[in-house]
Image (cartoon, rainbow, N blue to C red):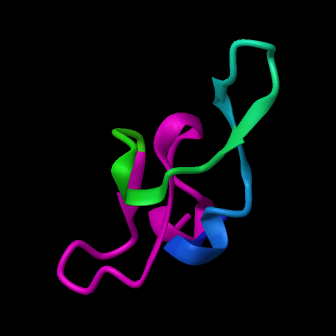
Amino acid sequence: MLLTENEAKFKFCPLLKTRDDKMKMCMGSQCMYWRWENENAPEKGYCGVAGKPVAVSGA
């Protein structure tokens, strides 16, 4: 799912949890898994944990 970084920050990250196992929100470009749709014009991106979204891979 392609999202702006601000939209992504309202989604839960399955890898980030607090000490009491509560999920945290996406960190966007501060996360090592965050990938931009277009590196030259970073407007929308996605979490790279699950691979490329269909809209980005062109399939």
Foreground: 7 or 50?
7
Residue 1 at x, y percent in the picture? 67, 64
Foreground: 41 or 17?
17
In the depicted structure, whether residue 44 falls above or below residue 12: below
Rendered image quadrant of residue 10: bottom right
Residue ID at (65%, 74%): 7
Q: Is residue 22 left or right of residue 16?
A: right
**Residue found at the very far left of the displayed protein:** 40
Q: Is residue 48 left or right of residue 37?
A: right
The verdict on residue 58 being magenta is yes
Q: Is residue 14 left or right of residue 35?
A: right
Residue ID at (34%, 39%): 32
**Residue found at the very far front of the displayed protein:** 19
Query: Where, quadrant-wise, is the C terminus in this rendering?
Result: bottom right
The answer to whether residue 4 of the structure is visible from this angle is no
Residue ID at (47%, 44%): 48
Residue ID at (53%, 35%): 49
In the depicted structure, whether residue 11 falls above or below residue 39: above
In the depicted structure, whether residue 39 falls above or below residue 40: above
The tally of labels here is: 0
Residue 29 at x, y percent in the picture? 37, 58
Residue 43 at x, y percent in the picture? 40, 84
Q: Which residues are magenta?
A: 34-59
The verdict on residue 37 being magenta is yes
Q: Is residue 53 left or right of residue 39?
A: right
